[in-house]
Image: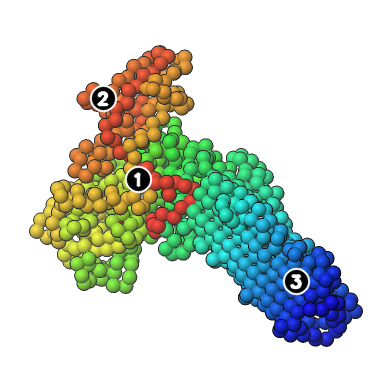
Amino acid sequence: MAATTTLISSGSTTIGAGVSLSVAGGNAAYAYSSYTPTLTNYGTLIGGGLSRYGVRFAGTGTVINTGSIGGGGGVRIDAAGASVSNGGTIGGTLGMGIRLLHGGAVDNSVGGQIGGIYASGALTLDNAGTIAGSYTAVTVASTALVTNSGTILAPKRGVQTEGGSLVNAGTIVGTVTYGVQFGGGGLSNLAGAVIASNSVALGVFGAGNSILNAGTIGGASGTARIGVYMRYGGVLTNTATGTISGVAAVVSRGAAGTVTNAGLITGGVGVRLHAGYANVLNLATGGTIVGTIDGGNALGSTAVSTIQLYGTGALSGIGTVGDIGAHVVNFGSVVFRSGAAWSIAGYTDALGSAAITGFAPGDRIDVRLAGVAQSVAVSGSSVSLFTSADRSGAPFFTFTNLTGLGGTALDPALIVASPDPLAGTFLTIACFAAGTRIATQAGPVAVEDLRQGDRVVSAFGGMAPVRWVGHRRIDCRRHPRPGDVWPVRVMAGAFGDGMPARDLFLSPDHAVFADGHLIPIRYLVNGATVAQVPRESVTYFHVELPAHDVVLAEGLAAETYLDTGNRGAFANGGGATMLHADFALRVWESEACAPLAVGGDVVTGVQRRLLDRAAGLGFARTGDAALRVLVDGREVALRDGCVDLPAGAGEARLVSRSFVPAEMFPGNPDCRRLGVAVADLSGAQRTSGWHAGEDGRAWTDGDGRLALTGARLLRLRMVDCGARFWVESEAAMAGVSAIRRSPGSIVW
């Protein structure tokens, strides 16, 4: 115990272990401004009084502590060049363990404890221990270089700096105000690291910021009000291991914001960007954003916000952006980047006005609640959808600016239009330049690149040489039975992991091998993971081996060509080319490599497994028809089976989800497309979109039209007949998600 302050001069001074210096009303150790001492403490230094310190240097110097330093404050150094290394305890009753009036360097090693740091000048801080302040744990009134692998926590702010650099591999918590209040610069929150607050987990207040998160940014003991707040924009990257959460997870204001996400961003508001700036949201497959996504700039604004869609590698899967125009708003541009497969869904106003570029094979656009397209027309960057196969009448929807890779115009012959579960249209692109991959001795080879003599893998074992590859392009519009030749899309993973590895398109009667039988794919259509897609034209390839066999097409076991006299159906068949190649007619004789199944227990068993597996690929079944009533094109309310009609109303439409019983219920022979069943109808007459009445009710096909008779009230009585409709699951519709499928393939 010392009654007076110990004066320290230049040079080295050591306080030994077991030595205790405690001064009532004064500093325990003091150096005048003219000295530059190095003090090593193994003992105990306690200053007395609120304004006194365990160690105070009026000039600069170095403190090395493995003991205990305390008082009103722990260590105070007044001049530039200060250095504190701590492996012990430095604290103060005022919550100020270390005070550096002109900045300096602090190294807090593993096991070290500091009761708060304040630096008026630039600070370099390396913390592997614990820094716990009574208000703010680390305050730097200048720039700082902060590296944290330990714990920094305080009731108000964890770290407050005017900018610089912060690398966090540990935990930073400011419970009430900010986890980190950062003036700007570069900040990295590494994998496993945490920045947390119940108010703003990370607030960045400078310009030109770059933020990288691979850890967790969010609430301290509950949900943060804001996860990341960028007051003057900047660049935020959330990697695959990163999570950002809050009532509003990411908010950017005051300048252009660029947010890149490959991890999880979740909140009532997922991302909110500021109006008037060219904001960018980069999305990687595998990433998820839950909550509204607001680009900030209304459609038609001078400033345009852009969504860019990226992959995360060769096996990156399919990314999904749902509800553009509802939960995803104020983006005037959507860019599909090469090397990834994306599915985007939205509503007519948002999709029709946005500039959508880079649309390519493997991508999908879902135009919801607009109608089901039977044909497509392309004029430059304008793509129009028609309900008629011959494009008669006006289009019901037009993309004003939809283009392929590099902004090139799309080929209408390669656009596949099919019904979605919400009375809308799926658009995909079939690619005939790089084809379905067949497993060969040399690895996967595109079917059109196979040559006579190439050895392909047989699903029964061994190899077999290619004898011939046939191909034929079909104009489906001129076919008398287009349903016989429209391709069937088998979604990646529909039969099992990697079966197929990519979306695979097959001719309707091309058989797949399952449960010891060959089953034409048309008998396994379920409207979701296996679905027929109407299109204007299609090119098919078939591979012939010395004997009928089963090969692996994109990993799915499928039959080879069996010559039953229809070789002339192919352009290179060597004889007269048939006007319409009819793949629905096959003669199965003794040459078939496995039994054929087109019904019975074998087929229904495979159908049930496909339906069960569809749930894991983003689909669910519901009894909710999502019925909407449109009167002269405007949606009106249906209350207790009644619709109030305005004077002069001419037409009503019952628009709903639709289903095919044979696709939803294994063994059911009904192949009609059904919407809702109506038992009683008054105030209107049925026109188009209705099936013949049965058992006192009539089914729509999902878009039943009614001619209004002048009545001011339309009455409908809906009948629940056990209908089941496909919907995309919540995971697939919650903004951005990763349904793990590989990029789309082509027809063979």
Q: Kindly identify which numbered label has been placed on residue 697.
A: 2
134 or 572: which is nearer to us? 134
Q: Considering the numbered disc 1 on the image, is that residue within a helix, a strand or a loop?
A: strand
Residue 70 disc label = 3
Disc 3 to disc 1: CB gap under 8 Å:
no
Left or right of residue 418, residue 53 in this image: right
Left or right: 92, with 709 as reference point: right
What residue is at 16 percent from the left and 64 percent from the top? 547
Instruction: Specify whether 274 is left or right of 469.
Output: right
Q: Which tag is nearer the camera, tag 3 or tag 1?
A: 3
Q: Distance between the residues labelled 2 and 3?
A: 87 Å
Horizontal and vertical percent for residue 414? 39, 49
- Say which of marks 2 and 1 sits in front: 1
Whichever of callouts 2 and 3 sits on the residue coming sooner in the sequence is: 3
Frontmost residue, 681 versus 731: 731
Circle 3: element type = strand
Q: Look at label 3 and name its amino acid.
A: Gly
Query: Callout 2: 10 Å neighbours few (<14), some, many (20+)?
Result: some
Residue 493: which numbered mark, if any? Answer: none
Badge 2 amino acid: Arg
Q: Residue 620 carries which label?
A: 1
**Residue 307: x, y in percent?**
55, 50
Foreground residue among 276 and 214: 214
For the point 39% across and 36% down, the residue is 423
Instruction: Please state which amino acid type lies under the numbered disc 1.
Output: Ala
Q: In this view, does 212 lie above or below 1?
A: above
Residue lying at 71% horizontally and 58% vertically, measured from the top left = 135
Local secondary structure at mark 2: loop
Give percent across and percent down for residue 529: 32, 50
Quarter that holds the N terminus: bottom right
